[in-house]
Structures are given as C-alpha cells and as structure tokens.
Image: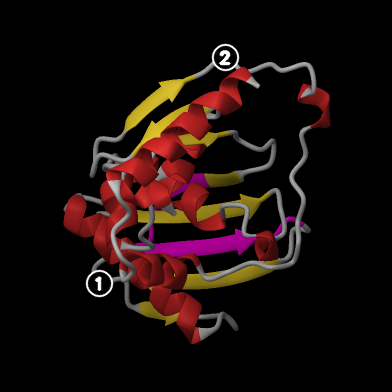
C-alpha cells in the first residue's frame, strides 16, 4: 500500500492473465460476454451504444451490470468517440476470479488499449489503486514501478534468478476488496519520507538477492 504514497514497487507478472476480443457488428448495441477460467459465462449483457442502457441482462446480477455501465461511461468521458458503433465483446480469464490475481487491473488495461485512453487515468476514475498491476499487465515484464499520477515511472528489468523455476503464486483464499482497502489506507496517517525510503531500499535489494 505504500506504493500509493510513492514507494517503489518490484512487480513480477504471472503467466495467467485476461483476454479481450472486440468485433464490430452492424446493430447499434454492445453485446458483452465474460467467461471464467472454466469457460462459464459470468456476465452476459446487451447495452445500447448511445447511453449504455441495459437492454438485456440475461441473468447477470444488477450490481455487475451497473459496474460495467459505470466503467464504460468513464471511458467515454475520456474518449468521446468510444463505442460510437456496435460491437461484440468477449473477455476470458485464465484464473479463478476469487484469487484476486488481477481481474480488475487486466480488464482496465485491455479496455484502455481498445479505447486508446490512459489506463492510469481510467483506473483512477474506476477502481482506484496505485496502478502497478496495470503496468505489469501492459508490459508483461518484471518492473520497478513508481506512481506519478497518470504518467508513472516504469522500468523494465532483467530478472532471472537461480530459483526462477521455483517462483509460484499461492492462493490463500483471503481475497480483500481492493477499493475498500485502498480507501482505508488513504485515511491513515501519511507515511514519512524515511518509511518510503526504507521500502525503496528493500525493493532494490529484491533484484540483487
């Protein structure tokens, strides 16, 4: 969380991610389907391209429909010509949504690439957060990351330690709501420069260890 306050992050991408396919269609609607890692549909909606009004929810919970509508409206506020015609959109995850591995950050990265908008600005207007995970999704490389509003400092790194074949992601089943946790952190006392510097030193040591 100190990355939110300007500390340097050392970030490694996982092999699993999220994909988005966008296909133009003649009808003035947005046909959206999202699939889990087991290819089950968890979102199936049809929205108007004019206002993103929901025309068909197809069993999708209202909370998810509203979240998607809110994100799409944010994209249009950044890119007025976004979705000015009909599209069929399909997204697919490589990992279980409950893992908290980056379903939001990879989605924001993919959506920003489609709309050609600043992904960090879109993140700030939607889910919030430092943006390190969006940077990893975009570069697919090991990076140093320093938050700098909408133009973060991202440094690609050469990282191939002797234990490279023993690096794993371990799911502890303790996923937290990132938006709530970020909001809670921002209410706390601002960390000192000394605390930030100590984290930066620790981050730099990861690359050498």
Q: Position of residue 111 (x, y in %)?
A: 40, 49
Q: Is residue 8 visible?
A: no
The picture places residue 63, in percent across and down from the top left corner, at 47, 82
Q: Which residues are magenta?
A: 21-37
Relative height, residue 89 to residue 72 (above, below): above
Q: Residue at x 75, y 56 (%)?
A: 171
Question: Separation of disc 2 and disc 1 at Cα?
Answer: 45 Å
Q: Give neighbour class at mark 2: few <14, some 14-19, many 20+ (Cα, 10 Å).
A: few
Q: Residue furthest front?
A: 194
Give percent across and percent down for residue 120: 31, 46
Displayed quadrant of residue 58: bottom right
Q: In the picture, residue 127 is in which quadrant?
A: bottom left
Q: Is residue 163 above or below residue 128?
A: above
Residue that badge 2 annotates:
158
155 or 54, which lies in front?
Answer: 155
Q: Quadrant of the C terminus?
A: top right
Name the secondary structure under disc 1: loop
Does residue 42 appear anywhere in the picture? yes
Q: Secondary structure at mark 2?
A: loop
x 48%, y 44%: residue: 133
> Which residue occupies 27% across, 60% down?
125
* Residue plotted at (66% across, 38% down): 14
167 versus 96 height, above or below = above
Q: Which residue is mark 1?
A: 51
**In the image, residue 61 lies in the stretch drawn in magenta:** no
């Amino acid at each position: 969380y100190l990355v939110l306050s300007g500390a340097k992050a050392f970030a490694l991408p996982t092999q699993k991610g999220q994909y988005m396919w966008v296909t133009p269609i003649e009808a003035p609607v947005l046909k959206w389907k999202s699939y889990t890692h087991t290819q089950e549909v968890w979102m199936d909606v049809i929205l108007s391209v004019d206002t993103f009004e929901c025309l068909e929810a197809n069993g999708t919970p209202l909370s998810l429909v509203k979240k998607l509508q809110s994100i799409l409206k944010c994209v249009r506020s950044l890119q007025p010509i976004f979705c000015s015609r009909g599209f069929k959109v399909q997204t697919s995850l490589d990992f279980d949504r409950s893992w908290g591995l980056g379903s939001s950050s990879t989605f924001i990265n993919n959506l920003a690439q489609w709309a050609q908008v600043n992904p960090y600005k879109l993140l700030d207007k939607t889910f919030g957060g430092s943006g390190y995970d969006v940077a990893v999704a975009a570069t697919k490389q090991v990076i140093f990351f320093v938050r700098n509003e909408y133009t973060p400092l991202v440094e690609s790194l050469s990282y191939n330690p002797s234990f490279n074949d023993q690096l794993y992601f371990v799911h502890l089943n303790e996923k937290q709501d990132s938006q709530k946790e970020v909001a809670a952190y921002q209410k706390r006392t601002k960390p000192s420069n000394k605390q930030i510097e100590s984290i930066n030193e620790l981050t730099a040591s990861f690359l050498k260890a």
